[in-house]
Amino acid sequence: MFQQNLFAEPRLKGLTKQQRDDSFFLLYYQFFKHAFGLQYSNETDRPVYVRIFFDQFPDTKEKVSIFKDYIHRLQYQTAFLQAKLKIRKEDIVEVTSHDHVVLQCADIVTGAMYFRLNNLHRAKTEGQRVRGKRTRAKEQLYNHINARIRDIYPHFNIGISTGFKGDARNKWNHPYRHWRFMPNET
């Protein structure tokens, strides 16, 4: 999931103070619940136990505990019950992404998309006429990732969500999914 900075603040308009304070967790919950298509992941008649590794949360232990409780209770929703997905509280954990290769890769892809969506590839240090080495290196990384995604989606456009091509099961089946978060108010 990616969002341009241009659209970050408008999404908070009209929300209560409590909703604004909890906006990270509210959005993250909906993202986790819907984006991965977990309800389509179990094609057996046996229960499947889901282990969830979240990157460390930038908030209080109390808020994190409440969020984890909401995630735990997903298993009681109809779609998760029908899919026989189970979530044990002890299987919802926070980790440091640089200690986990898969999360590290997700961070790199997310960072590259953020970099490009927010036009940071054009950034120059004040007083300089050319972009810095790090900026150019990040652009090369984005270009490499973009090329790999285009192997999967030949007409991939960073500014548009990949969608699920008419079949919600593809939320689980697609090898790469890209959701550009846009608030309704824009």
Image (spheres, grey):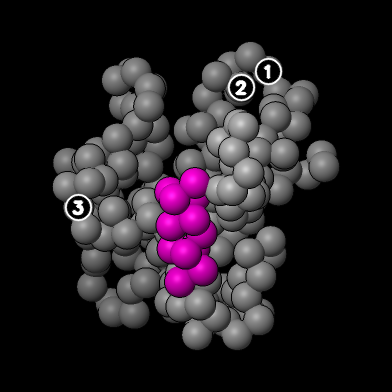
| Residue 65, position as x, y percentages in the image | 31, 26
Residue furthest out toward the right: 186
**Quick check: 21 above or below 173?**
above
Q: What element carries label 3?
A: loop
Q: Mark 1 is on which residue type?
A: Thr
Q: In which quarter of the image is residue 13?
A: top right
Label 1 sits on residue: 16
**Mark 1 against mark 3, which lies toward the viewer?**
3
The reply to whether the magenta stretch includes residue 134 is yes
How packed mark 1 is, by other alpha carbons closer than 10 Å (few <14, some 14-19, many 20 or more), is few
Q: Which residue is drawn at 32% across and 59% down?
A: 105
Left or right of 78? Residue 158 is right
**Quick check: 17 above or below 153?**
above
Q: In which quarter of the image is residue 45?
A: bottom left
Label 2 sits on residue: 20
Left or right of 96? Residue 118 is right
Q: Residue at x 82, y 39 (%)?
A: 185
